[in-house]
């Protein structure tokens, strides 16, 4: 393998992404690819503790450290202590910021003052503002977040070809990897994962409508439906759905851990998800996703890795998108961008995805 300029210049690269689970999941295809392309460089990924467990079957030259920057390394003093520990342990010679927010900028400044080169990824705030503003929207697709991550490593001189296939390589995970969750998949079985929740209201399909989707697919032949989510309230809602059918399992009732859940997802046939972390988790195991979009839009650059925009279920409204994250109040007051999506639209798209895989329901 031909060595890149980055591999010649840098031996120990610190990569930082502190934020939400889905954002960290989006970095994995890029970080794994860069590691595989540049085996002579050691990469150290620093992220939140829960997200650190996503890095399954990682390249040998990637180390992952989960940290708590809200408690253990809180504030500027905490970041200074973390910086000293990382430099001492890993002899860092390049800081790569894949977050681009105040905390990561402050953290990077500490390395810069120590004579270490710092590179920040470009979030593209101006383009996102033009796409989500109320009037005179520029309805053009923006560069994906993964392309923006890749560009940072390219600026450092690293080879950045897309080599990532799945966290399980070219195969699906073995049954023993998810045996604590569910028995092995049998030939002819149809497995569908449904993740109906998101962090913000502007990205959550109404529960009474999603229940109709669950009711429909649960009646299909040889189907098993896995409901995914987190939190007590979410689990109670999905418990109500699962109680009606023997073939619907609520995975939120207990914490199985990402290795087991991702192994199970790799054996599913399709997922239904909001614009949420679950879409990006499914992308890590090459699972096609029927994604549901409301206040947000795939044009903002957050469509799952190698997911198809044709599988995105959304309404063409003049007010969409109104938000990058789905956290802004609905200007109409009714969230019609979500409530106006008929359950059959989602069901029909599930059928299309399955038919492309040769599965008829």
Image (cartoon, rainbow, N blue to C red):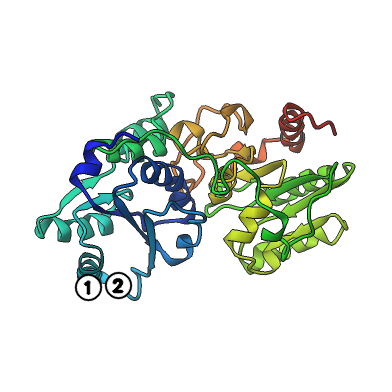
- Residue with the mark numbered 2: 73
Dot 1 lies on which element?
Answer: helix
Farthest front residue? 1
Instruction: Identify the mark at residue 10; answer none if there is no mark.
Output: none
Left or right of 55: which side holds 336?
A: right
Q: Residue at x 70, y 51 (%)?
A: 207
Dot 2 lies on which element?
Answer: loop
Image position, residue 58 (x, y; %): 46, 53
Image position, residue 188 (x, y; %): 85, 41
- Residue with the mark numbered 1: 81
- Tell which of 347 and 295 is nearer to you: 347
Would residue 320 be visible to someone looking at this image? no
Where is residue 175, by image quadrant? bottom right
**Disc on the earlier residue, 2 or 1:** 2
**Residues marked 2 and 1 touching at CB (< 8 Å):** yes
Image position, residue 236 (x, y; %): 72, 66
Left or right of 181: which side holds 306?
A: left
Question: Pointer 2: residues within 10 angstroms few (<14), some, or many (20+)?
Answer: some
Would residue 194 be visible to someone looking at this image? yes
Left or right of 221: which side holds 196?
A: left
- Above or below, comparing residue 221 to residue 348 in the picture: below
- Above or below, comparing residue 328 to residue 236 in the picture: above
Quadrant the N terminus occupies: top left
Kindly report the distance in space between the C-alpha atoms of the residues bearing marks 2 and 1.
Answer: 7 Å
- Tell which of 250 and 331 is nearer to you: 250
Image position, residue 325 (x, y; %): 45, 46
Quadrant the C terminus occupies: top right
């Amino acid at each position: 393998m031909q060595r890149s300029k980055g591999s010649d210049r840098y031996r120990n690269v610190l990569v930082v992404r502190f934020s939400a689970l889905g954002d960290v999941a989006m970095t994995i295809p890029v970080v794994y690819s860069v590691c595989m392309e540049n085996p002579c460089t050691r990469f150290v990924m620093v992220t939140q503790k829960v997200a650190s467990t996503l890095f399954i079957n990682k390249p040998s030259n990637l180390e992952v450290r989960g940290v708590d920057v809200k408690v253990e390394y809180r504030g500027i003093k905490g970041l200074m202590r973390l910086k000293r520990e990382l430099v001492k342990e890993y002899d860092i010679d390049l800081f790569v910021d894949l977050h681009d927010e105040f905390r990561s900028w402050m953290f990077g400044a500490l390395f810069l003052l120590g004579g270490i080169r710092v590179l920040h990824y470009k979030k593209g705030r101006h383009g996102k503002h033009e796409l989500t503003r109320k009037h005179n929207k520029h309805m053009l697709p923006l560069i994906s977040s993964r392309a923006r991550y890749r560009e940072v490593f390219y600026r450092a001189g690293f080879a950045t070809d897309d080599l990532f296939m799945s966290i399980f390589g070219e195969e699906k995970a073995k049954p023993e990897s998810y045996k604590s969750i569910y028995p092995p998949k049998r030939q002819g079985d149809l497995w569908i994962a449904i993740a109906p929740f998101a962090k913000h209201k502007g990205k959550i399909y109404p529960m009474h409508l999603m229940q109709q989707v669950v009711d429909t697919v649960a009646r299909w032949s040889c189907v098993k439906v896995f409901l995914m989510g987190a939190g007590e309230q979410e689990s109670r809602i999905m418990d109500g759905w699962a109680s009606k059918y023997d073939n619907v399992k609520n995975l939120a009732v207990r914490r199985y851990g990402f290795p087991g859940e991702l192994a199970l997802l790799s054996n599913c046939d399709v997922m239904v998800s909001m614009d949420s972390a679950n879409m990006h988790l499914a992308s890590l195991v090459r699972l096609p996703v029927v994604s549901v979009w409301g206040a947000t839009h795939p044009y903002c650059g957050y469509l799952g890795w190698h997911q198809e925009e044709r599988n995105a279920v959304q309404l063409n409204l003049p007010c969409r998108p109104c938000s990058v994250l789905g956290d802004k109040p609905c200007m109409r007051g009714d969230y019609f961008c979500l409530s106006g999506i008929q359950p059959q639209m989602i069901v029909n798209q599930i059928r299309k995805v399955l038919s492309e895989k040769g599965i008829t329901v």
